[in-house]
Image (cartoon, helix red, strand yellow):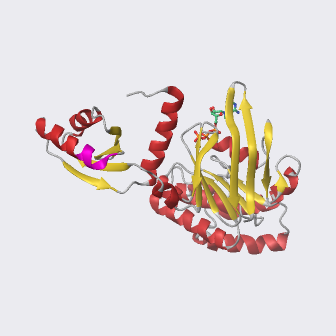
Amino acid sequence: MEHDIQTFSLVKKFGDITAVDNLNINVRKNTIYGLIGPDGAGKTTTMRMLCSLIKPDSGTGKVGGLDIVKNSEEIKKHMGYMPQKFSLYGDLTVIENLEFYSEIYQVPKRESKEKIKFLLEFSSLLNHSYKLADQLSGGMKQKLALSCNLIHTPKYLFLDEPTIGVDPVARRELWKILFDLREQGVTIFVSTPYMDEAERCDEIGLMYQGSIIKSDRPDNIIRDFDKHILCIVSDDIYSLKEAVQGIESVQDVYLRGEELHVVTANMECTKNIIEESLKNINLDFVMSENIPTLEDVFVNIVKSRAEMTYGKCN
Ligand SMILES: Nc1ncnc2c1ncn2[C@@H]1O[C@H](COP(=O)(O)OP(=O)(O)OP(=O)(O)O)[C@@H](O)[C@H]1O
């Protein structure tokens, strides 16, 4: 199996903080790899090392078979990196921004004209070509930022939370672009806080405290989850939560919108105890078993890790 992006025991420290801790990642060629994890897990630091913007303290990494420290200049020619705050020039038009990045990447003039035309169509920005970047919506700005990173036809694309602050329709459009890029042979490494986006990746890595604690296809991660999720709705969700979280076979309880999600290893027994307890306090409720979502699994894995590290807190 051919890998385009790899890390081998990668470590990065900032003073006392170990931001990336013995990280091992393997990203297959021509796939979308999603890095997900809580704030401060080390996602941005990982991406910055892979893009040769900062050096690791130890360990190594490869992009397209090239060493991220020794061959950084060569790697940069073939990669695009869109950080969380990508610099667009607000007082330049959409086309002018693309022309500017085309010069930065030293794309030959004739090639650049063709590429800009292609990217404007590809990212549905053609009708906005002469708008100032500052006048674009959040979603369009991100599409322009992405296009600026595609001007030199990179083989590897690194995107740090590219859809933050983007509305759901524009988010879907951006993902359509990513799928098209994968079709064209680009390997994509993306971090996202959104679980619906993580589910669209070919493989995801759950990052916690600098390491990958689980890595697989999203459907495999959900399939391997060996616990059950009970979903309960009630008019008095807070009394419901209080009553349920004291039950011994309940491993975790959390709110998801209007619903209370209960995690248990023993579904039938927990269901019966909850029914009894809620009847005793005269609470109206509706309970059903839910198929676990990636979000349920993610919350559970991260909480279990945190409990292993810091002990249980209720
Ligand atoms: N330049 C820096 N100097 C000191 N500490 C840093 C620096 N960059 C990152 N850190 C620390 O390293 C840890 C990992 O940060 P990082 O930004 O990589 O996490 P993240 O998973 O990308 O978080 P977020 O989702 O909030 O962006 C955090 O504790 C952070 O405070």
Image quadrant of ligand 1 equals top right
Indicate the position of residue 243 as horizontal and vertical percent values.
23, 34
Indicate the position of residue 122 as horizontal and vertical percent values.
63, 72
Residue beneath the point at 79% across and 70% down = 112
Indicate the position of residue 272 as horizontal and vertical percent values.
20, 45
- 292 relative to 304 in the view: left or right: left
Residue 112 vs 59, above or below: the answer is below
> Which stretch is magenta?
266-271
Q: Quadrant of residue 104?
A: bottom right
Residue beneath the point at 12% across and 40% down = 279
Q: Residue furthest top?
A: 16
Residue beneath the point at 85% across and 68% down = 108
In the foreground, 75 or 162: 75
- 285 relative to 35 in the view: left or right: left
- 100 relative to 276 in the view: left or right: right
- Image quarter where the N terminus lies is bottom right
